Image (cartoon, coloured by chain):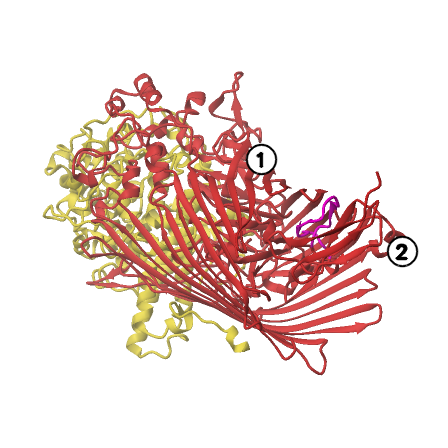
Chain colours: A yellow, B red
Amino acid sequence: CVSQLDQLPTVETTSESVYTSVENYKSVLAKLYASYAVGGNEKGDGNADMASPTAAYGYLRSYFNLQEIPTDEVIYTWAGGDNLVDIQYMRWGASDTWVSSMYYRIYYTIAICNEFLRNAGDDKIAGFSEAEQQEIRVFAAEARFLRTLAYSHAMDLFGHVPFVTENDQVSAFFPPRITRAELFDYVETELKAIETILPEPFANEYGRASRAAAWTLLAKNYLNASVYTGTERNADCITYCNKVIGSGFALEADYGKLFNADNDRRTQNEIIFPIQSDAAKTTTWGGMTYLVNGPILGSMNSPDYGVTSGWQSIRTLREFVALFPDTTGEVDRRGAFWTDGQTLDVDDPSSSSQGYTIVKYTNLNDDGSYTTDDGLVNTDFPLFRLADVYLMYAEATVRGGAGGDAATALGYVNQLRERAYGNTGGNIGAAALTLDFLLAERGRELFWECVRRTDLIRFGRFTGDDYLWQWKGGTVEGSATDARFDLYPIPATDLAANPNLIQHTGY
Amino acid sequence: QQQQQLTVQGTVRDDQGTPLAGVGIAVAGTVAQAVTDAEGRYRITVPAGAHQLVFSSIGYLTQTVEADRQQIDVVLLPSSQDLEEVVVVGYGSQTKKDLTGSVANVASKDFNAGLVGSAEQLINGKASGVQVMSNSGSPTAGSTIRIRGGASLSASNDPLIVLDGVPLENGGISGNGSNFMSLINPNDIESMTILKDASATAIYGSRASNGVVLITTKKGTTGTLRIGFSSVLSMQQQQKVADMLSPQRFEQVIQEQGTAAQQTLLGGQRTDWVGQVFQSAFGTDNNVSLSGSVTNAVPFRASVGFFDQQGTLRTDRTDRVTGALSLSPTFFDAHLTLNLNVKGALNNNRFANTDAIWSAVAFNPTQPVHSGSEAFGGFYESLDNAGVPATGANLNPVGLLEQETHKSRVGRSTGNLDIDYKFHFLPALKAHVTLGYDYAHGEGENRIPASAANAYTVGGSFNEYAQNTQNRLLTAYLNYTAPLENSSLEVTAGYDFQYWSAKSPSVIYFNEAGDVQSTAMASDQRHTLLSVYGRINYQYGGRYLVTATIRRDGTSRFSPENRWGTFPSLALAWRLSEEDFLSGSHTLSDLKLRASYGVTGQQDGIGNYGYLSIYNRGDDFAQYRFGESFYRVLRPSVYVYDLRWETTRAFNYGIDFGLWGNRITGAVEYYTRKTHDLLANVSVPAGTNFDQTATTNVGNIESRGFEFQVNATPISRETLTWEVGFNATQQHTRVTNLSMVEDDKSVGSYVGPWVSGRGIQILTTGYEPNMFYVYKQVYDEQGKPLENVYADLNGDGIINESDLYRYESPAAEWFLGFNTQLTYKRWTVGTTLRANVGNYVFNNTKMDLGAWETLQYVPFALNNLHSDFLNTGFRARQYYSDYYVENASFLRMENITLGYDVGRIAGSARLRLGAIVQNVFVQSKYTGNDPEMPNGFDSTFYPRPRTYSLSVNLQF
C-alpha cells in the first residue's frame, strides 16, 4: 500500500522523459523562443506560463509598455484600468504592476533557458549520435543567445540585477546580485562565445537566431555601453554593425511591408531577428495583437488594417508628430498620422479622440488581403532589423567611434531617407548628420519598435527637463522628472525575497 | 374545598408524533411514579392535594403539567444539550458529558428551515466559531464554510467534511464546481457535528487544521413502518443590485455635463435593465421517506427528494433528484452490526452568464432592449464604424442571458458499508471497518450562437466538458473498553487508506461552423493518503477525563523524504460538578473545565504533483515556427521538491456549564493557534524557479479567539415552551512571517480581487491578513471626498505608493448568532438572527461606476453611472481610495418561521404546516446592497434573494 503514495502525472511529462529525443529538445527550444511571443501554452496566452495575470500578457507587451509608454511616442487610453498611469506619467514605484511583469517575465525566460542548458551539457547528451549532439549544441547556443537577450533587457531596464545560470539548481536559494557593468561583461562574453557556434546569417531556420542576431545584440549593447558601464564602446559597435551589414542584409524597398502580416518574408533582406506572431498557431492578446489593434480608434475602419475591431488605446503625442515634416505621410511616408476626429493636443489622456494615432503595424498581407481570428494577427515583431544597424553605425561614427566612416554613415542614413520619401528630397548633407538629427531619425524610423526609452536615456533626454512632452511627469504640458527613472526599480517583491539585492538610489 | 384523588391517563409522544416508551411520570411533591409503555401510554393516580405531573426522559426536556383532568397527552421536546446525548466524533462516538474537546453538535430539529439548497446552510448561525456564507444569490453558487476562520493563507481554509465516516474531497466537479455539498440532500441529514479544537480534530491529522464537519445521515429505526412526506414551495424575490442613476436623471446629467458627441448617444428610451434580467424565482423541495424494518430484523430508511430552484437572474436554474438508502441489520446477538448507506444525486444546472449583472447595472438606460434589426439576435448593441459591436462596449445584458446556453449535468453517488463486530470472546473489544466511496460524473456544454454580440467575432462558440471523480476509502480500527473499577479506559487504533482521482478529457472549443477555436488540456489528478491513528480516552470517577490522540499520515503530494507527518494531541477535562463540594448544588447542574493541545496538518489546496519537475506540452495555438514547420512547445512547470506539511499547533481552553437542571447550558472557549511552515504561494527569488511565485512552506500566522454559546429553555410547560440560543465568536488573526528571508521588510504581497492591475488586499508580516491596501482619502469641509487628494502618510511631499496604508480587513471581529423558538399549543414561531461586527467591504461597484470616466469607454457607447457620482463628482475612478472601504457590520434576520401542528388528520397521519421567510432583513450602515461579501469585495454582486416558503409535512 505504501507504494500507492507514488502518484505520477499521466497527462504531463516529467523531466526525465523529456530529454530523451532531439525532437523534445527542439520542442523545449521552441518554448524558449515562444517565451518572447506568447504568455501561455494555449490559445491567447491561455494556460499561462506565470501565475500573475499581467505576466500572462507576455514579454512583448510588457517590453513595449516600459520602452514606449513613458516616452513621447505614446499616450494610452486605458492607463487607469490597465494600471499604466504611473508608467505613463513617469512616477512608478517598486510595486508597479508592469515593472514587475517585465522583470519576472525576463527572469522566467532566463530560468527556462537555464533549465534547457542544464539538460544540454555534453554529459547529458552523450547518448545521442554525433549528428544529434551537434544539433543539440546549436540549440544550446541559441538558448544562450535568448538568455543574453533577456539579460540585456534586464541590464537596460533594471541595471543591477540578480544573476542565475544553468549552474544553479531549481530551488529556494538567493541568487547573487550582479552590477550593470559586470552583467555587460557577462553578456559580451557569452555572445562572443556563441558567435561561432550559431549558424551563419540566413543559414538557420526561419525564426531561429543566427550569428547576425548575436552581432546585432552586441552592437546595441556597445552603443549603450557608456550608460551601462560608463565607458564608450563605439568602435566595437561599428565592428559588429559592419559584420551584420557585410553579411548580405539589404533594405526592404517598401517601409510598410516591414510591419505587415507578410513581414516574415523580410527576413531574407532586412529583418534580422523577429518575435513571431500567427493568428492561428502563435496566438497572444499581448504582443503584436496589441500593437496592431491598439492604435485603431475613432473613425478608423478596423478591416482596413486586417482586424475586426479597434482597441482605441494607443495614440501619440504632439512632440512626436513634430518630428515629421507633415502629418499626412505624403512627404515622409513613415509619418502617416490618423487625424480625422482626433485633436493634436491631449488634455485628457483617457479620451481616445485626443492625440493623433499612426499606422505602423497592420495585419494585411502584401496583396491587401488578411486573415484574422477575433483580431489575432500574423504580423511579426521586427526586434532587430538592418535600418537600426545602419542608424547605430551612423551614431557610433558621429560619436567618434574608431573605424567608422562619416561618408558611409551618411550614405546609410540617406538610404533610409530615400525609402521614406520615395525620392532623394529628404536626403541630408554631412553637416546635418548630428546626434540630434539621429535621435529624431531614430524616432521617425524606429517608433513603436521598443527602442525609444533606451535612445532617450542615451541622449540624456528621458528624465530631467531637457526634453518635455505632454504628460511627462503627469502634467498637461510636461514637467521635469527625477533621474532615478532612468532605471526601473527592482520590484519590491524580489527585494523582499532575495536579501542579496539592493534597490537603486531614489526608490 | 378538598380535592379528590384523580386518575390521569394519556400518551406521551415526541415532536415527530412517535410514542415514547419509558418516560418517567412523577407527581410533584409525592412519591407516586409511573412509566410509559411501548405505545407511550401511562396511567397514574394523583393523590389528593397534589397538582402537577412531571414528565421526564433522557434526551428530552422535562415537562411539568397541571394535573387538572383525566386525559393528559404530552409532547416531549428533545433537549439539545442533554449530557447523555451521544455525539459522533472522529472514528467513534462519545456522550456529551465525556467530551474533552471543543465540539458543537447541531441536530436536525435545530436546523434552519425553509428552502435549503445545501447542507451547510442548515447550521448557519447555530454554532459559535462556525461561519457559513452563501457565495451569491445564485442557486448554483454554493457557500463558504469557515471554522474559527481557517488556519491557512493560500492553502485551503475549507474544513474537512466527513459524510458518514467518509472524508470528502475538497472542491467539486466540472459542472458543479462550487456547490458540491448540494448533492447531499439536506433532508437526509440527522445531525452535523463540528470539531473545532485540535484535540477533537487531530485524529484526522493532515487535513484537520481548518476543523472538521461530521455529517451523519438519517438511519432506519426498529418498529412500525413510518412514511414521511414533506414539501416546500417557495418564491424568491430579487433584491436591489446597485444605486444607479434613473433613466431620467442619467439623461439630465448627460445633457448638463456631457459633450455633444455623448448627447447623441442618448436613445430616448426608459429601460429598466436590472428589471429586464431579474425575475421572481420559484423553487420547490419535495421529499418522501420510508423507515422501519424489514421482517423486524433489518432497520432501513429509504428516501427520495426532488429539489428545483430558479435563480432570480433569468435563465439561472438548478434541479436535483436525490435518493438515499440505509440498511442497518444486526447479527449474532447484536455482535455484528452492518450499516449500509448509499446515496445518489442527479443534478441539472443551467448557469446564467452573470456578466449580465454588471452589464444591466451599467447599460445605457436610454437605449432599448431590441434594436428592431435582425443583427445580433435583434438585441440593441453599441456598434462601431464598421457596424459591429465596438470592442470594449458594454454588451446587451438581455442578449447575454437569452442568447447563451450554459448547462451541466452531474451525477454523484456516495456510500459506505460499516461493519462493527463485538468479539464473542471479549465483547469489550470491537472491530470496525468502513468501505466508502464517492464517485461523481459531471458534464456540460456552453453554446453561444454566431449572431450573439458576445461571440460574433469568432462565429459563435461551442464546447463540451466532462469530469470523473473518484474517492475510495478503507478505514479499519479496533476499539477496546477496559472495565476498570471507578474509571474507564477506551483505546482505539486504526488504519486508513484513501485514494482520490479526478480526470477530465481535453476540451475543444468550436465555432458555429465547427472550426476548432482553441483547446484546453486534459487533466488527470490523483493522490493518496495513508494513515495510522490511535486514541485513548480515560476517565476517573466521572470527574477526570483525558483524551490523547495520535495520527501518522503519508501523502502522495510530497516527496518520499517529506511525505510522513505525525499529529498528536492531548486533552484534559475536569467535571467539577461531580465533585462532592458541588454535587449538592441546585443551581449548578453541570460544570466542566477543559484544556487541550494538539498539532494538525494541512495539505489541501495545493497541487497534487507540486514536488515533481513536470513539463507541460503546449497546444496547437501556442506553437512556434522554425523554418516552414510549427513546433508544439514543452514547458517546465514550477516545482518545489522540498514541499512539506503545513502544521498548526493549537491550545484550547473551555468551560461547559449547566444551570437549574440544565435548563440553561452553555460553553465558553478560548483558543490560540499558530500555523508554521505555511503552504503559501509567495514570491520566490527571481530566476530560481519557473514562475514569479511558488507554493512553498514559508511563514507563520497566529490566531486567537473567544467563543461563547448558551442555550436556555426559560419556559417549559404543557402548552408553552420557549427556547433561546445565543452564540458569540471573536476572532483575531495576524501574519507573523511571510518570507524566506529572516528580516522581512517587504510591504507584503497583494491578494484578493484584482483592482486596476493588482489585488486590493495585502498580506504583510505583523498585520491581520487580507487588509485593504489603500490611500487615505482627504475630504473638503463639507465632507466631500477630493479627487486624487490623499494623505501624505509618509510626509515626503509626494503622494505615491509609499503612502498606501493597511486599512481594516474583510474579517469580522465578532460573529453573533441568536435563535429562539416559542411553542404554544399547536403553534410554533421561531427566528434565527446573525450579526457580524467589524467586517469591512470594498465597494467596488461604487468605485467602478461612480466616476465620470466610466460613462464612456468607447466613442460608440455610454454607460450608466452610480448615483454616488452626484456626491463626489469624481472624473477618474479612485481605485485605491479608502473612501470605498466601508464598515459592513450587519444584523441579518436569517429566517422567521411559523409552524402549526394540525395533528392527526386521518388514521395515523399527522400533518404539520409551516410558513417561512428567509433573509428577512439586513440592517447595516454599508451603502451597498448586501454587507456580506465574499472576500469583502462588492462588485455587482448577484443579490441574495428574500425567500417566502410554505411547507407541508405529513407523517404516517
Tell me where residue B563 sits by quadrant.
bottom right
Horizontal relation, residue B779 to residue A38: left or right: right
Horizontal relation, residue A398 to residue B325: left or right: left
For this rendering, which residue is in front, A81 or B22? B22
| Residue B943 in view, yes or no | yes
Pointer 1: what residue?
A: B891
Q: Residue furthest right?
A: B581
Pointer 2: what residue?
A: B580
Q: Name the subunit of mark 1.
A: B
First-in-chain label (2 vs 1): 2
| Vertical side of A87 occupied by B741: above or below | below
> For the residue marked with disc 2, what is the amino acid?
Asp
Tell me where residue B216 sits by quadrant.
bottom right
Q: Which mark is residue B954?
A: none
* Residue A359 percent across, percent down from the top left: 20, 38
Q: Secondary structure at mark 1?
A: strand
Which residue is at a point 26% across and 44% down the rendered structure image?
B403
